[in-house]
Image (spheres, helix red, strand yellow):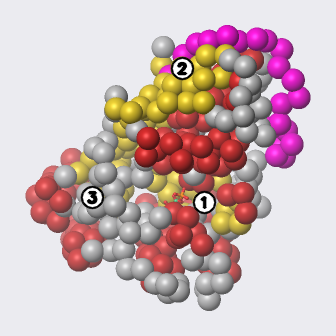
Amino acid sequence: MTEQDFIPKSYTKEVGSGKVTWQSPSNIALVKYWGKRENQIPANPSISFTLDTCRTTTSLDFQKKEKGTDFDFELFFENEKKESFKPKIIKFFERVEEYLPFLKEYKFTIQTSNSFPHSSGIASSASGMSALALCLMNLEKQLNPGMSEEYFNRKASFLARLGSGSACRSIKGNLVAWGEHKNIAESSDLYGVEFQHPVHENFRNYQDTILLVDKGEKQVSSTLGHDLMNGHPYAERRFQQAHENLDLLKGIFEKGDLSAFTKVVESEALTLHAMMMTSQPYFLLMKPNTLEIINKVFDFRERTGLHLCFTLDAGANVHLLYPETEKEETLEFIKANLLQYCQNEQYITDRVGKGAKKLA
Ligand code: PMV
């Protein structure tokens, strides 16, 4: 599919007013997206586990009106009016208007809330942007009821990507790949696709315990972060490495090789941070407690032979990934040994999930 396929030619129905609600999860990248070209085209392919309990619920109330010159909407976050979130939504609407030509013909009320604590340092843009994209697609589906499910999902992912790149990996479940890769079926720079290759049962219900090491504001915004890869001395080699790591993961998923999984996933996390440490300007986003946790994870693995591994986003928090079959011992270890490195001992237990869903 190309960008042109997402520009609607005409609508077959008139829709006056209504309300739709979608719940969309966050995701955690195994091969990281870091660096982009214009229009949120990723510089390299990435793959993520869709999460389950970390999610955003968004309702979109719509009322048809005369087409205006501006976007007309109100925004409530956790039941409070949030003027400060509006510029981000306006920017999103501007980017997607070409693909959703009805936007200026409705007055919208957007109500949104997260399942995870506010400013926990958990990225809410992936779940937030995908939930909003799904609500807008739901309205478009009412205008064009003939739309196929595949088109609906791809366009929702396409729109979410224009809001926040990694959000395009939150529409569907388990494993989602985004960005063209020669050996990943149907992969596209424009939207995320469900990973369609064999996945061993070792990866079923994979666990993710998120340790909240630093709940502060992000030190480096995603926009600035991706920009740091322009002219970065190691960028080209890094982009190539992401392709190689995806090939490795494809084999690992098929075989169920948990030790090899650890090697790729931890190396990806450290590479992401190495890119930030070696850019100009440079950033050091890990905290002393991040390193304490990482070293304890190494020790635990060495001592027990279990398969706990870590990954990081662009911040100090740590995602701990482990198989469901090792849940009991691993969680016990985390609670006894790692919570002391979290702010107020805060953590979130999550696992791989099935993707977004519509609420009645
Ligand atoms: O979606 P963005 O622009 O916020 O970028 C997210 C980048 C990482 O979370 C660091 C990696 C990823 O692939 O999710």
Magenta residues? 1-21
Residue denoted by label 2: 61
Mark 3 surroundings within 10 Å by alpha-carbon count, few (fewer than 14), some (14 through 19), many (20 or more): some
The residue sitting at 36% across, 52% down in the picture is: 122
Looking at marks 3 and 1 on the same chain, the residue that comes earlier in the sequence is marked by 1
How many marks on residues? 3
Residue at mark 3: 215
Residue at 62% of width from left, 48% of height from top? 91
Q: On screen, 266 above or below 354?
A: below
Q: Residue 216, how many percent across, how many down?
A: 29, 61
> In the rendering, at what x and y percent does residue 43 appear?
68, 67
Q: Of discs 1 and 2, which sits in the foreground?
A: 2
* CA gap, disc 3 and disc 1: 25 Å
Distance from disc 1 to disc 2, alpha carbons, whole Å, reads 33 Å
Residue at image x 24%, y 63%? 213
Above-or-below relation of 303 to 74? below
Badge 1: how crowded within 10 Å, few (<14), some, or many (20+)? many
Judge: label 1 CB < 8 Å from ligand 1.
yes
State whether residue 192 appears in this view: no
**Secondary structure of the residue carrying numbered label 2:** strand
Q: Is residue 272 left or right of residue 163?
A: left
